[in-house]
Image (spheres, helix red, strand yellow):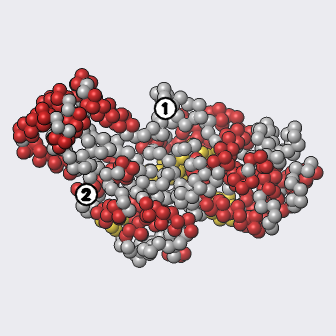
Amino acid sequence: MGAPGLGGQGGNRPLLLLQPHPRPSSPSPAQRSLTRLPRTCLARYSSDPLSLPAGAPTSWALWGLRSMRALQRALSLAISHCPWAGWGPLSRSPILGGGVWQHLSEAAAQGRETPHSHQPQRQDHDASQSGMLSRLGDLLFYTIAEGQERIPIHKFTTALKATGLQTSDPRLRDCMSQMYHMAQESSSGGLLDRDLFQKHSVGHTKIPFCLQSCVKPLTYAISISTLGTDYVHKFVGKEPSGLRYNTLSLNEEGIPHNPMVNAGAIVVSSLIKMDCNKAEKFDFVLQYLNKMAGNEYVGFSNATFQSEKETGDRNYAIGYYLKEKKCFPKGVDMMAALDLYFQLCSVEVTCESGSVMAATLANGGICPITGESVLSAEAVRNTLSLMHSCGMYDFSGQFAFYVGLPAKSAVSGAILLVVPNVMGMMCLSPPLDKLGNSQRGINFCQKLVSLFNFHNYDNLRHCARKLDPRREGGEVRNKTVVNLLFAAYSGDVSALRRFALSAMNMEQKDYDSRTALHVAAAEGHVEVVKFLIEACKVNPFVKDRWGNIPLDDAVQFNHLEVVKLLQDYQDSYTISESQAEAAAEALSKENLESMV
């Protein structure tokens, strides 16, 4: 599928949606194409010019922690306001368990090959060039595929079971459900290909751009992780300045106001590896940034670095001002600190790798791809606090008021946005407003918060007009299962009658595949058993995870009256009914072996 050129006029703008193991919700035909396995995506296009200059390159990438079914649905309503967006999982992949996860995460972190990391006919450009696969999705697929272009579902499930996991494990329910839907709709005969195990990009998410000021919170987080809060804040403050970001100004204590202004960022740069030379300092920070990006693209633009040095008169003035006010630690070379600051501003990322960095902040300092703990919890907390109060230049107050999320903007048109415990986002749209922030980026952030209660002070319980994708997709269903089984356990026939009249499925199962009839039979509640078999006509042959049917439980606990009821009911339960139930059971989402 083609994508518009960076310099073209008008035309379509790409929208990238990365869906992390969503929960099934009876999708419409248009939405079914979205229902994929973990870390897959949909590409669509939008042609609304947003009343801004046409042809401006605009890219978005997000990585998220929770199931984003609701976010996906509502963002589709805002496509005309959303030039490019995507998200993916923050937590460890639910399809990785035990040794498989450990092996793959270590290989991903170290950039080495797995035993079966080669695919003769289909292999991306980076893998063919370097002979290694850095993405966990590719590592998972090639570890199991053994050089084949596709692998059968049963082979994948067998590999899962070899790690000690079962397909009925509640932690794998989302993954199993998506695989089930894929097998039902696919014409490949139950085969999985590589695209189902990785994110997919369409458009310009892989175009590198310089971080510029977006590197300031990352550098600050690194300094806090390595040096500690108390030491760092001897040299830089925590308050918004109320002045332009490049103003020659200090607070009442004679130190820069915060790490998000140029003076504060220069001082923070001077604190990193003070006993090392300039090359070692830069390599140290670059290695940290690579870890935060999960070994995705992090580069360096020497042309930008040289330009910064040649045209950075204002920053040189700030440096000499800081030196005159003795703001640097003793023995620090001011010019070396400025060089490192210019180098860090010239670090390149893509929307994809930048969003992983943001997701690392959203995930408490743990990289969502490698699972490595990169930053301390203290560093993440301090960084997000300062991004919230000082991250958007002179627009910080309004951004905190209208959006209420930690963010950092840059003159490159980038916005690094963090939704704590949910997702990280990197936006790129170079058209800037008068304050130096991306106009489209701010527009998108405001639209996002208007649709979802991500604002720091949104009411999470009584906000009826906004969606909350942080709530588990199956929360309501899980609650009904608990209520149903508890009513059966306590012998509350009136509650069961109320549930039945509300069209509740009286054969719902818990994580052990036990139904209300199992519970009532085990407890010996005769009236409950009578209601379930006479009024609700539930299936008496459902087996729990240990292979027991309700009659087995009644026999085990010596409830003779219940045993007699169930035996009579089983005799009258027709063969055709039991066969229909068995067929329905075979199609259960929790039983993938029916697809093999």
| One can see residue 422 in this view | yes
To which quarter of the image does residue 329 belong? Answer: bottom right
Quick check: 226 left or right of 138? right
- Crowdedness of circle 1 by 10 Å Cα count: few (<14), some, many (20+)? some
Q: Tell me which amino acid carries mark 2.
A: Glu
Q: Residue at x 31, y 35 (%)?
A: 481
Mark 1 and mark 2 in contact? Answer it, CB < 8 Å: no
User: Which type of secondary structure does the marked residue at label 1 adopt?
Assistant: loop
Q: Which is more N-terminal, label 2 or label 1?
A: 1
Residue 147 spot, x, y in % from top left? 38, 74
Residue lying farthest to the front in this orientation: 558
Residue 282 spot, x, y in % from top left? 74, 64
- Crowdedness of circle 2 by 10 Å Cα count: few (<14), some, many (20+)? some
Residue 574 spot, x, y in % from top left? 6, 41
User: Which type of secondary structure does the marked residue at label 2 adopt?
Assistant: helix
**Is 235 situated above or below 492?**
below
Image quarter in which the C terminus is found:
bottom left
Q: Residue at x 66, y 64 (%)?
A: 287
Q: Tell me which amino acid carries mark 1.
A: Lys
Which tag is nearer the camera, tag 1 or tag 2? 2
Residue lying farthest to the top in this orientation: 494
Count of labels in the image: 2
Residue with the mark numbered 2: 593
Residue with the mark numbered 1: 466
Quick check: 295 left or right of 173? right
Q: Residue at x 39, y 60 (%)?
A: 196
Q: Foreground residue, 511 or 418?
A: 511
Residue 351 spot, x, y in % from top left? 58, 55
Image quarter in which the N terminus is found:
bottom left
Quick check: 374 left or right of 371? right
**Is 451 situated above or below 109?**
above
